[in-house]
Image: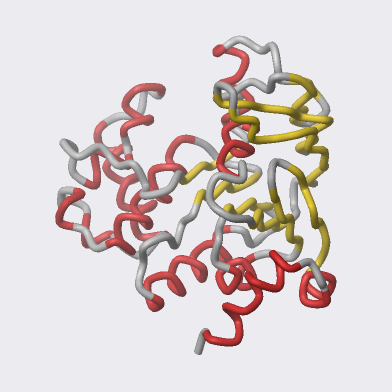
Amino acid sequence: MITFAGVRFSYGERQVLRGVSFTIGAGEKVAMLGGSGEGKTTILRLILGLLKPDSGKVLIGGKDITDKTEEQLREVRMKFSIVFQEGALFDSLNVKENVVFCLREYTKMSEEEIDRKARELLRTVGVEQALNLMPDELSGGMHRRVAIARSLAACDPVMFLYDEPTSGLDPLSADNICRLINELSQGGKGLIIVTHKIYDAMRVAERFMFLKEGRLIFDGDRESLMRSDIPEIQGFLSELTIRP
């Protein structure tokens, strides 16, 4: 479903990706690991066409999206449900209005249908009781759940994209988000989770990629990851020995 072919990308003079290549199938569950600033979130933005590579190709469903217009990219983005770090809810809108924002903008659903859809989605992520709360009244875990509900309202995704979905959460809330991620990906839907938490990656992923200095230095399954002698990966795996 997703193919990167020799992708290079820079922010100004800082080169973030240096010829990254991989293919991810629609039903795969993939964790992208690496330190801060290694290009993990950049890869998600390239998948959605929010950024364009300096060179190389990004293909979605076998089609190069590099030169697609915004209108053409909308069809591509409908294949994905994206939850960016911190959830990025609109502070001035309550939970319901955040969830149904895209429905109001892009559909002709009645108010009754919109209300029913909002309740259904919030029930799916376990926070229907927060329907009328404002974002600043939510706990960190509830905030992420609402962000996931809003992403589901926009489309019926083929694949879920998560950018640090458990960042800043306490262990219990992080475990609940991982459980929800697993529930939503049942039925053959894939996911890509960007994280620096190896424990959470192990909870939801079956394939693991590791980025360092703009290059993919590891791409393999759980067993291969655990056996890896790459120092950076061993550093990440040390979290497993201290996590209860």
Q: Residue furthest bottom?
A: 244
Rendered view: 9 above or below 208: above
Residue 61 percent coordinates (x, y): 78, 31
| Left or right of 87 on screen, residue 4 | right
- Closer to the camera in the image, 60 or 14: 14
Picture quadrant where residue 143 is located: bottom left
Quarter where residue 6 is shown:
top right
Identity of the residue drawn at 23% across and 47% down: 95
Instruction: Residue 231 in the image: state x and y as whole percent.
Output: 73, 68
Q: Is residue 74 left or right of residue 217?
A: left
- Quadrant showing the N terminus: top right
Residue 64 left/right relative to 92: right
Identify the colour scheme used.
secondary structure
Seen from the viewer's position, the closer of residues 77 and 58 is: 58
Q: Which residue is located at x 70 percent, y 41 percent?
A: 214
Query: As rendered, which of 225 and 217 lies closer to the eye?
Result: 217
Q: From this viewpoint, which residue is outermost toward the front?
A: 13
In the image, residue 70 above or below residue 205:
above
Q: Residue at x 40, y 77 (%)?
A: 171
Q: Quadrant of residue 204?
A: bottom right
Q: Tag count in the figure?
A: 0
Q: Position of residue 94 (x, y in %)?
A: 18, 43
| Left or right of 148 on screen, residue 35 | right
Q: Where is residue 194 shown, x and y percent of the image? A: 58, 52
Closest to the observer, 94 or 221 = 221
